[in-house]
């Protein structure tokens, strides 16, 4: 069908423009005739041109087209072909300029003719559904009945039926949002089915009714008794992040598996119907044109999760337990002289410090970056391997995932004057989190910065308080832990190490982008209204890729020497990454596979900018409430 107007342009404005076009041409002619009389150079030629019959004819064509377009969005003309013939007629006798020849050729083109023919065929058809004749013997109470005809296409009808628990009638259980039945506006949950395509459903099982429907082609006629108290829906659309995976085909409890919507943790869903306490209707935000599907309600999914949670043997968050770490443990067991270890560490750290200073002194100004100390990293690694049940360590992360199967989210666009979002890198030990972080900060140390960690270990002669670490007493440190001011913390060789929320805030308050690496258990502490953490998971590539790319890579060990990756280290890295994804994947805003270091670095830079500049789905509590978590 040809539509009369472009959207957004008012008809009055269009009319005005057309009048101006025609009147404008008349005015130009009048003015030109004046100039002509005054014998201005070249005006005569222009005057003749504007009066030429072919131009007049073209203007008529223009006017004709606009008149036809101005008509209603119903077929412009009963016969578009007739209009085309009219135009051809108008062009007859017009001098054969290139443009006119082109226009005539176009109008004679068989493809265009076929198109116009198709238009005429469609325009003359009546697409209103043809209803079957009413039955002769209409019963007395027929006014209580409704006859609904739906023209079935490839889509499912978008309604489910069930047997009423008390009356035993077959009733419409639910109408799926956006489906054929919903769009028809003729079927409602609770309507009692009497007949389907003339077949009485009395005594039939719902499956038998479905069978009749499956076999039906084209128009399906339902005879039904409308539900008396139709539920008034005053739903508001809600967006949520799924905190768990859901596979309807594996859920024996779902009322209709075919109508279920599968989803994976981390995906954003649009909830369109919460009328049912147990089964909501939703669609993927990535496919809003699709018909909705059934998902378990918050309450139901929570119950399912709890059942699943308790039915599973506990899976602690075990990460790398590499040969390197075994070596560390062995060394500890072997009671290495503490002083000797300290000396080694000191030497190592001096070298590391030197390396950092050299790396960032290129611009003429020496910039020191904190948060890369070996002791801090080894402490973190040690905490990964304590084998503590994760709910004991982080009651707010894993268990809250079980407690809140959906997290309400809103679209957030950071205002340029807002503080930058905290960037959190997580990944299995050895994957390259620190390498990437170091490189990113190295690109622009005045813009990207780490948070300075706290420690209870003594300050060394070459260190500065607040540069490598904030040096605090054990009591102060523990107070910070108890008052939830630590994003993460751990112990290494009798000393406490950790990163505080305040240390991060200090960087952000300076207008910089703070980049930290955290153990995944620390994610929830950073996902607050205040820090608005953007979580990037650094994922190892496949084993074969790692064997290639990590040929010359070295891992930090408890020893003074750097060690090469062994096959089992790579395997453990892969296993650990899988576990992290399974347990915390719902919190990852971005996943970067660190295969080629250079490429991963570019991706990281782009992700960091995206986090600050592009609209993102964030927890609704960050935006809607001042009393956020
Ligand atoms: N894509 C890569 N290709 C080759 N080598 C890499 C790549 N990414 C990291 N490396 C190297 O792997 C080693 C370990 O990286 P890194 O120290 O960043 O690990 P990490 O993830 O921070 O682990 P940890 O926190 O346990 O120190 C380093 O020698 C680093 O240069």
Image (spheres, rainbow, N blue to C red):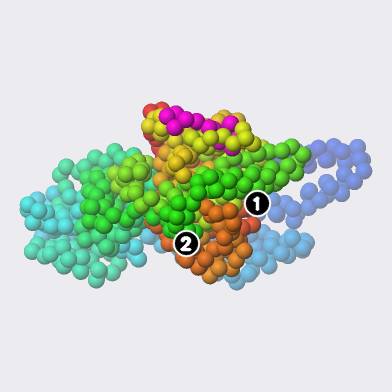
Give the quadrant of the C terminus. top left
Locate residue 125: give its quadrant.
bottom left
Dot label at residue 567: none
Instruction: Left or right? Give the position of 281 relative to 348.
Output: left
Pick the front one: 310 or 255: 310
**Which residue corresponds to mark 2?**
323
Seen at 37% across and 60% down, the residue is 127
Q: Label 1, secondary structure: give it.
A: helix
Pick the front one: 49 or 529: 529
Dot label at residue 62: 1
Q: Position of residue 245 (x, y in %)?
A: 34, 55
Numbered disc in front, either 1 or 2: 2
Residue 246 appears in the picture as rendered: yes
Residues shaded magenta? 465-476
Whichever of labels 1 and 2 marks the residue nearer the N terminus, that label is 1
Q: Distance between the residues labelled 1 and 2?
A: 82 Å
Seen at 74% across and 53% down, the residue is 55
Q: Are marks 1 and 2 in contact (CB under 8 Å)?
A: no
Seen at 59% across and 57% down, the residue is 562
Pick the front one: 309 or 156: 309
Pick the front one: 336 or 492: 336
Residue 111 forms part of the magenta stretch? no
Q: Position of residue 377 (x, y in %)?
A: 51, 47
């Amino acid at each position: 069908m040809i539509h009369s107007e472009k959207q957004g342009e008012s008809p009055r404005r269009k009319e005005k423009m057309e009048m101006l076009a025609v009147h404008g041409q008349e005015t130009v002619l009048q003015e030109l005739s004046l100039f002509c009389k005054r014998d201005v150079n070249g005006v005569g030629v222009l005057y003749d041109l504007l009066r030429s019959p072919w131009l007049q004819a073209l203007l008529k064509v223009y006017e004709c087209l606009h008149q036809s377009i101005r008509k209603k969005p119903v077929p412009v003309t009963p016969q578009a072909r007739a209009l085309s013939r009219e135009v051809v007629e108008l062009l007859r006798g017009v001098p054969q300029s290139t443009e006119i020849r082109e226009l005539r050729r176009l109008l004679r083109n068989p493809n265009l003719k076929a198109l116009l023919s198709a238009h005429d065929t469609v325009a003359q058809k009546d697409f209103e559904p043809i209803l079957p004749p009413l039955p002769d013997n209409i019963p007395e109470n027929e006014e209580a009945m409704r006859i609904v005809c739906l023209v079935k296409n490839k889509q499912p009808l978008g309604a489910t039926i069930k047997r009423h628990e008390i009356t035993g009638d077959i009733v419409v259980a639910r109408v799926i949002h956006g489906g054929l039945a919903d769009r028809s506006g003729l079927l409602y949950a609770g309507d009692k089915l009497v007949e389907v395509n003339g077949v009485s459903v009395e005594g039939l099982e719902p499956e038998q009714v479905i069978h009749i429907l499956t076999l039906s082609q084209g128009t399906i006629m339902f005879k039904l008794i409308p539900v008396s108290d139709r539920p008034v829906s005053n739903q508001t659309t809600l967006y949520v992040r799924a905190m768990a995976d859901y596979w309807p085909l594996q859920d024996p409890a779902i009322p209709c598996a075919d109508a279920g919507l599968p989803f994976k943790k981390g995906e954003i869903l649009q909830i369109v119907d919460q009328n049912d306490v147990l089964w909501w209707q939703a669609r993927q935000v990535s496919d809003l044109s699709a018909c909705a599907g059934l998902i378990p309600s918050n309450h139901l999914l929570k119950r399912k999760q709890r059942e699943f949670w308790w039915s599973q043997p506990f899976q602690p968050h075990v990460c790398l337990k590499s040969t390197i770490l075994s070596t560390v443990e062995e060394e500890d067991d072997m009671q290495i002289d503490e002083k000797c270890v300290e000396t080694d560490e000191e030497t190592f750290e001096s070298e590391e410090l030197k390396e950092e200073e050299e790396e960032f002194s290129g611009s003429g100004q020496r910039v020191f970056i904190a948060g890369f100390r070996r002791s801090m990293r080894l402490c973190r690694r040690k905490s990964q391997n304590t084998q503590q049940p994760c709910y004991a360590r982080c009651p707010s992360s894993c268990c809250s995932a079980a407690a809140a199967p959906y997290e309400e989210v809103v679209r957030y666009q950071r205002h340029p004057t807002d503080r930058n979002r905290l960037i959190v890198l997580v990944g299995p030990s050895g994957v390259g989190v620190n390498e990437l972080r170091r490189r990113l900060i190295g690109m622009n140390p005045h813009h990207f910065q780490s948070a300075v960690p706290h420690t209870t270990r003594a300050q060394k002669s070459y260190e500065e308080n607040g540069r490598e670490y904030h040096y605090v007493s054990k009591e102060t440190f523990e107070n910070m832990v108890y008052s939830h001011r630590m994003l993460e913390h751990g112990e290494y060789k009798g000393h406490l190490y950790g990163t505080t929320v305040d240390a991060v805030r200090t960087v952000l308050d300076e207008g910089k982008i703070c980049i930290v690496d955290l153990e995944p258990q620390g994610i929830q502490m950073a996902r607050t209204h205040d820090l608005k953490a953007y979580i990037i998971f650094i994922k190892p590539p496949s084993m074969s890729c790692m064997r290639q790319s990590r040929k010359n890579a070295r891992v930090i060990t408890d020893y003074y020497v750097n060690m090469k990756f062994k096959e089992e280290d790579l395997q453990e890295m892969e296993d650990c990454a899988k576990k992290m994804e399974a347990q915390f994947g719902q919190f990852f805003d971005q996943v970067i596979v660190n295969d080629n270091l250079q490429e991963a670095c570019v991706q990281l830079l782009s992700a960091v900018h995206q986090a600050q500049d592009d609209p993102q789905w964030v927890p609704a509590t960050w935006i809607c409430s001042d009393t956020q978590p």
